[in-house]
Image (cartoon, helix red, strand yellow):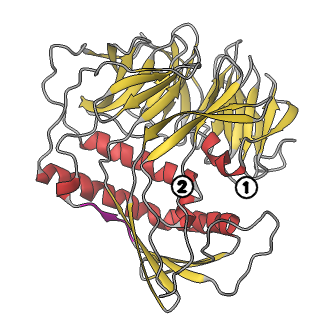
Amino acid sequence: MTRAAIAHPSRIMSIHSRILIVLALAGRSLLAQSALPPVRSIGSITAASPSEFASISSIHVLSNGSVMVNDLTARKVSLLDPTLAHSTVIADSTSATSMAYSSRLGGIIPYHGDTTLFVDPQSNSMLVLDGAGKVVRVMSVPKAQDATFLIGGPFGNPGIDPSGRLVYRTMLRPKFAPPGADGKFAAPMSIDSAPIIRFDLDARRADTAGYIKVPAPRVSISSSEGRMQVTMQMNPMSVTDDWALMPDGDIAVVRGADFRVDLLKPDGTVVKGEKIPFDWQRLNDSSKQAIVDSVRKVVEDARTRELAIVQGSASATAGSASGATTGGRAVIQMRVGDGPPAAGAPASRSGGTSIEIPPVEFAPLSEMPDYRPAFSAGAARADTDGNLWIRTSTVFNGAPVYDIVNSSGQLVDRVQLPAGRSIAGFGTGGFVYLAVRDGTVGVRLEKARTK
């Protein structure tokens, strides 16, 4: 993976979300095992907003039933009334409000009570908003390089534990070394684990709660006359872990290798869960190839749209970058070294290295798992009652199934959402909020009963 791509995890977030949909739709559920609860539908829809959002990435349900919504695509934060019928724009990228959304992606994190943290990676700050969306104070992010991970998505949804610590997932960054004496570049080592951080906002102290397994694309580098070509080989069915912060402060880690839930306790202890019953789906070479072909189309369709943003990320992170597309390949001119330049350092346009980013390659079918992974990144969500909802690769009547696991790690329910819906968040009293994209213009928010 190139440094430009690594420096901007929000781009990876977008591609991983598309891949997740492809894998879910490509699956075929086998006969249900007797140990599995029957699949049921979600409860009745009780309220719905107009289709006024370009996307719904995260929400915060307030004590009076109002809902703060973050629209990443439109770069807008809105506050919906309890009926979801009326909204007030809290922040956007225009001068319509007193609070600017900034030119990059932002995120919201439920804070104490009805207050909300608005994360602005561009300024490396977190604005504390009251229940009406007014700024009451400003804090700095834990680490500048972690700011984008506070947005949420496939990297998990950050939250505040009962002790007031900010919990989020970050990544271990490979080092890009300058060329050796022979002029050749060495590919960075692939890293297949990522830390989950508990950050004390008052003491400004970070502790690593644990690690999860993440996909590790295989990277190779070749160079000639100052031109470096980076090739990334990915496995579209990588076995990965996922995580979610539970209401009691436990961090639930869903292990992909054997599909169980481990609990990282606030005191540092780990409680390992039992394997969750699952209808594992065996894959032959033809089904593996069908998945590769589907994912390849998703990635190739996204490359053109992503290039401009990757260039901007490289510019912000590496200090100097320019880009162009030649013959279907992305070429970025950037400096390669052990790390980005110091803040405020001038960007050098001389002595740079041209990095050519070819289309993504895929691992051989022989290296792909013989059974479809139970879930993909961004699958786990915690409700307010201490249950963990895991979006699985099982497909029933054309839509993915959520396995619901209780605080003891036991599978207690299996739920399917109506078509075109995904979970945006949970409210108290047994309610779930759904982001709906069903072919109409825009995205709307629905409130439904969990049963």
Whether 207 is drawn above or below 187: the answer is: above
Q: Earlier in the sequence, mark 1 or mark 2?
A: 2
**Residue 52: x percent and y percent?**
62, 37
Q: Which residue is mark 1?
A: 103
Residue 104 lies left or right of residue 184; in this view the side is right
Whether 335 is drawn above or below 108: the answer is: below
Instruction: Answer whether residue 331 is visible to the viewer in this image.
Output: yes
**Residue 80: x percent and y percent?**
69, 25
Whether 70 is drawn above or below 328: the answer is: above
**Residue 289, quarter of picture:** bottom left
Residue 119 lies left or right of residue 284; in this view the side is right
Amino acid at dot 2: Arg
Q: Give me the disc on residue 232.
A: none
Residue 162 lies left or right of residue 138; in this view the side is left
Extent of the magenta region: 359-363
Give me the residue at 55% from left, 55% from top.
Answer: 173
Give me the residue at 55% from left, 72% from top.
Answer: 177
Q: Which residue is mark 2?
A: 11
Nearer to the camera, 407 or 181: 181
Amino acid at dot 1: Ser
